[in-house]
Amino acid sequence: MTAASTLGVRPVRASLLRRLKADYFSTPLNAVVSVLCLAAIVAILVPLVRWSVINADFAGTTRADCTSGGACWVFVKARFGQFMYGFYPPSERWRVNLAACLMIGATALSFWPGLPRRALAVPVLWAGLLVVAAWLLAGGAGLPRVETRQWGGLMLTVFLSVYAGALAVPLGILLALGRQSELPVIRLVATIFIEFWRGVPIITVIFLASLLLPLVMPAGWDIDRLIRALVGLAFVIAAYMAEAVRGGLQAVPKGQWEAASAQGLGYWQTTGLIVLPQALRISMPAMTNEFIALVKNTSLVSIVSIFDLLGIAQASLADPAWVGMNMEAYAFAGTVYWLICFGLSRWSRHLETSRKTTH
Amino acid sequence: MPAGELTRYFYDKRVREIFWQVALLAGLAGTIVVVVRNASQNMVNAGMASGFDFLWRTSGIDVPFVLTNYTPDSNILALLWVGVANTLVITFVAAIAATLLGFVIGVARLSANKLLSGLAGAYIEFVRNIPLLFFVLFWYFGVIAALPGPRQSIGLFAVAFLNNRGLTIPVPTDGTAFRIAALVVLVGFIAQAAIAIWAKRRRDATGAIFPVWATGLALFLGVPAVAFGIASVVSAWDVPALRGFNFRGGFVLVPEFVALFAALATYTAGFIAEIVRGGIQSVVKGQWEAAYALGLRPNRALSLVVIPQAMRVMIPPLTSQYLNVLKNSSFGAAIAFPELVSVFVGSALTNTGQAIEIIAITLAIYLALGLAVSAFMNWYNARTRLVTR
């Protein structure tokens, strides 16, 4: 304790040098740690910047244009259309862009505070969007058809995430309610369903869906293989969503149920009007985290030869005209995934903190 | 029956509850009947075999990484066992490495040194926001494939060699000494568990405190170190050496194994680090202060007040991370590492075509391993959850 602080005199703001010394070189151990960290940062950043920016090639159209020895971004530029849209016909790509714009608009509208009758408006809005977007992407009814075999790249990653997520959220809420139900049969069925899908690897579920779904359909029915993977993903994510929602349900005090019953509300009224709005607000960050996991797990569809962003990046390495572009392809795909997931996780954290201030 | 009585039935809570449950069961039973009928019809139409006889057929599949005494002449059941063994081995080693790395990074994240905590934070944010499949492919096609050939291997202490054909490690020619050492370590673990139970009973009864941490440290770290140290000195070693264009001797960890291990360990470590950070931060300062106010010394406050509360927060998500490692070991299928999914759902299914049986067995194995952990977690959650009225 220094004399200044005991006398209640505030010391003048320490100089930068002194603060650096206090923060990073206060003890010998701290100094060693600081120097090692600095060395690590330099050892990582310098080669990275040199490879990706200083020695990189940006201009040109073929492999021969890459002469500097660094990253060959020409490759990514030449493949950009495929990384984004897969083999979607270039003349029809406006449909994908339009669907993406509609989705961004719907997301913004869902979080607009002035939206009237939110509890009804948001599900209706999204149901409508999913139908319109599916029509835009697949075609039919006035638009030329585009087979799902031609879909790919980032567009497919987003498609799988959004549609599997949209199926998983309502199913997950029902499962969570079922697991908390007082009726033993319903509780048992919901618990078995949740634990089954949470207990098995997603790869096996994607195999299960793509190999066995056609087998259990009536003879002559054929399900699109993209839909098979989508159903498999949605079931697994629903089970994880259910656990996220259950956390929220458990956090709603029992008194809320009792107060609602005392008002004469039945089970569905209590659930829909009193409990779920509170529970969902609490589980929103956890549900966002499950959605991030879903975005990452969509990459597994490449196991059954559906080429999402990562799958198409991997497949592009086999092109004899672009041998040895591993690092460029991975760097691009990794950066896109990172930006999407990091953005979502920041948003989830924002939800968490904004919830804390309202209480 | 008069109409009034019917409506009374309709509004009776018990009657309605039974109705909904019966309706659910009927719906499920109906779905199952339709599914089974469709499946058997489709299988007859396609001329597919069914039943589990195929397990005793000769497999004829060559597996590059075998820890059992499997050969291509063995039956498919033996092939299944190769997959299970490889899954368990990669899960075990990756979980241990991820835990060590995760604890180090998690504690570094809480460091007062902003450079260190920033570096740890950057690692966590990097790893958590990219798909695991990316890392598996990256390590396999980006790193291991880019390593030099056997003649320019990277030597590790001149006994292990890393090159683009994998990691060649020395193995003892006779494992007897190591088996004895493992047995000694196991006995030590059991003794520690017994001491802990006895010490807790005595503390509850008399208040006397026994230094469980000291015996724990000795039995968990000291005894294994000494036992395996002696074993490695007395055993003869088969050290790999360069002969011509490749290594002779030792045991080759195939590139798939090295890549999957590296990806699983580094990826899971990012999640474990966050769990460790959260666990330590979750114990509020007031708990320390309250413990001091009751007259506990710092180490007692730590072991009796803070650690039990931090563990309450850390154990369930840690367990679920280990479960994730088990499930994520199936990513080996993407680079043909012969774990359960790869050898069974991949190779064996292609050979026999019995999709239903093979997928059912695979799911059952993962469920049996996973449900055990889930049951434990739910029991732990129920036991430690803060109970309200």
Image (spheres, grey):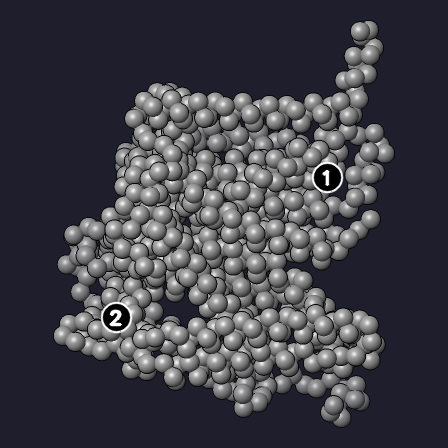
Task: Find residue A189 and report its horizontal and vertical position in percent.
Answer: 61, 35
* B176 relative to A89 in the view: left or right: right
Task: Find residue B359 and report its horizontal and vertical position in percent.
Answer: 40, 40
Residue visible at 77% across and 74% down in the picture: B202
- The residue under label 2 is B163
- The residue under label 1 is A275
Numbered disc 2: secondary structure: strand
Asked if residue A112 shows in the view, the reply is: no
Up the image or down, A179 lies above or below B283; here it is above
Q: Are marks 2 and 1 on the same chain?
A: no
Numbered disc 1: secondary structure: helix
Up the image or down, A64 lies above or below A157; here it is below
Chain under label 2?
Answer: B
Asked if residue A297 shows in the view, the reply is: yes
Residue in front for this viewpoint, A213 or B90: B90
Three-letter code, disc 1? Val
- How dense is the environment of label 2, judged by Cα within 10 Å: few (below 14), some, or many (20 and up)? many
Q: Which mark is residue B192?
A: none
